[in-house]
Image: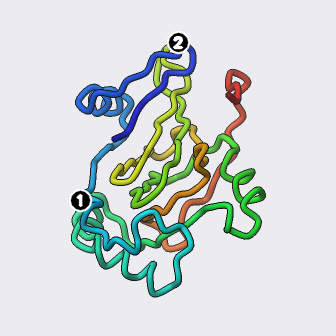
């Protein structure tokens, strides 16, 4: 279950409905998938073959198709990141720059943990959304954010796209942003 940390107050929000209400107020879509249906050999497995990636996608086919029908996604893939990922440090540097996109950025976490840092509306400032297996989040288009791994440094996530070329990151300069 997702947990929120508001950076400028260090307030934590962890109750399910409170998380949902906060994210809805920030125009961030949040849902939850049942990851218990994932076969045991794919749970907490962060080095997947192409066949295993296809198996994860097939396991969540109905959820992916439902979400795509509701939100207009055309393509999807599966990303795996862990210390076994070649050039992980370089990838994280790319991910960890505050940016926006012209379409929403959606991730459905099937294993591991990750965190979106999102610029909130009004006085909220930046907030962290700590995600674990089953969490599905969609950061709205043109909303400043970035994504990174948590201390476990391992994640498997479905990414969905409207455009065939995927998200194109537009750098977002914000002097108020302080990296934690």
Give the residue number, with chain letter if any, for mark 1.
Answer: 70
Quarter of the figure with residue 174: top right
Quick check: marks 1 and 2 in contact, CB under 8 Å?
Answer: no
Q: How is the image coloured?
A: rainbow
Quarter of the figure with residue 65: bottom left
Above/below status of 120 relative to 58: above
Q: Residue at x 55, y 26 (%)?
A: 126
* Helix, strand or loop for disc 2: loop
Where the N terminus falls, by quadrant? Answer: top left
Q: Residue at x 47, y 70 (%)?
A: 78
Labels 1 and 2: the sequence-earlier one: 2
x and y percent of residue 36 in the render? 26, 61
Q: Nearer the viewer, mark 1 or mark 2?
A: 2
Above/below status of 165 relative to 16: below
Q: In the visual, does 129 lie left or right of 25?
A: right
Total labels: the figure holds: 2
x and y percent of residue 131 in the render? 44, 44
- In this rendered view, identify the residue nearer to me: 6 or 152: 152
x and y percent of residue 30 in the render? 32, 43
Q: Residues within 10 Å of mark 2 (few under 14, many from 20)?
A: few
- In this rendered view, identify the residue nearer to me: 77 or 60: 60
Give the residue number, with chain letter if any, for mark 2.
Answer: 9
Query: Distance of mark 1 from mark 2, alpha carbons?
Result: 35 Å
Query: In the image as oriented, which residue stretches furthest toward the front?
Result: 40
Q: Residue at x 41, y 82 (%)?
A: 54
- In this rendered view, identify the residue nearer to me: 94 or 12: 12
x and y percent of residue 48 in the render? 52, 77
């Amino acid at each position: 279950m997702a947990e929120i940390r508001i950076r400028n107050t260090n307030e934590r929000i962890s109750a399910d409905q409170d998380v949902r209400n906060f994210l809805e107020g920030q125009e961030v879509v949040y849902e939850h998938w049942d990851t218990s249906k994932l076969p045991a050999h794919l749970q907490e497995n962060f080095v997947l073959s192409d066949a295993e990636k296809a198996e994860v996608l097939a396991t969540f086919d109905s959820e992916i198709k439902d979400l795509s029908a509701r939100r207009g996604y055309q393509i999807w893939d599966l990303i795996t990141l862990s210390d076994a990922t070649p050039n992980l440090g370089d990838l994280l540097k790319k991910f960890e720059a505050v940016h926006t996109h012209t379409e929403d950025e959606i991730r459905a976490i099937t294993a591991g943990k990750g965190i979106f840092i999102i610029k909130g509306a009004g006085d909220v400032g930046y907030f962290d959304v700590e995600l674990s297996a089953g969490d599905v989040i969609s950061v709205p288009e043109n909303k400043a954010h970035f994504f990174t791994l948590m201390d476990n440094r391992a994640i498997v996530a479905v990414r969905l796209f409207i455009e065939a070329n995927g998200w194109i990151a537009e750098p977002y300069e914000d002097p108020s942003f302080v990296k934690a």
